[in-house]
Amino acid sequence: MHDFKDKQLGKAIPHGIYDVASDRGWVTVGIDHDTAQFAVNSIRAWWKYLGQPRYPTAGRLHITADCGGSNGNRIKLWKVELQKLADETSLEIAVCHFPPYLQSAFI
């Protein structure tokens, strides 16, 4: 949600995934920039280490995301990276974006 800056350690950028079905979360922390590649790599890591073992017969992944930043609905690279993930995993990936005015309701 937010970057955390530390004068000695630099910047920490968290990207979180919440698995509604299992009521569990996953957070990837980067140290460079919040990019579409970083956001999708977070999903990729979650799928590899938790999602696929938990849902071995899944053929579809439904993602809900906010409308800003690296995973915004107008970010072409986000869509390209998601397609790469879909190709790698053979998952059908659907994304629903929250309207910007709803973001504050979930904070």
Image (cartoon, helix red, strand yellow):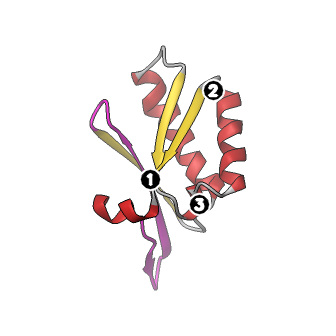
Position in image of residue 45 (x %, y %) = 53, 40
Up-down relation of residue 57 to residue 4 (above or below): above
> Is residue 89 left or right of 19 when viewed as pictured?
right
Residue 98: mark: 1
Quadrant of the image for the C terminus? bottom left
Q: CA distance from mark 1 to mark 3?
A: 14 Å
Badge 1 element: loop
Residue 93 picture quarter:
top right
Was residue 18 drawn as part of the magenta stretch in this picture? yes
Q: Nearer the viewer, mark 3 or mark 2?
A: 3
Local crowd size for mark 3, using a 10 Å CA cut-off: few (<14), some (14–19), many (≥20)? many
Magenta region: 1-23
Check disc 3 and give the amino acid type.
Answer: Ser
- Mark 2 neighbour density, 10 Å: few (under 14) some (14–19) many (20 or more): some
Residue sitting at x 43%, y 80%: 6
Query: Which mark, by number, is residue 81?
Result: none
Q: On the image, numbered disc 3 is attached to which residue?
A: 70
Helix, strand or loop at mark 2: helix
CB-based contact (under 8 Å), mark 3 and mark 2: no
Circle 2: residue type: Thr
Query: Which residue is the extreme one toward the bottom?
Result: 7
| Along the viewing direction, whichever of 28 and 2 lies nearer the viewer | 2
Q: Residue furthest top?
A: 57
Residue lying at 69% horizontally and 37% vertically, measured from the top left: 83
Q: Residue at x 65, y 51 (%)?
A: 78
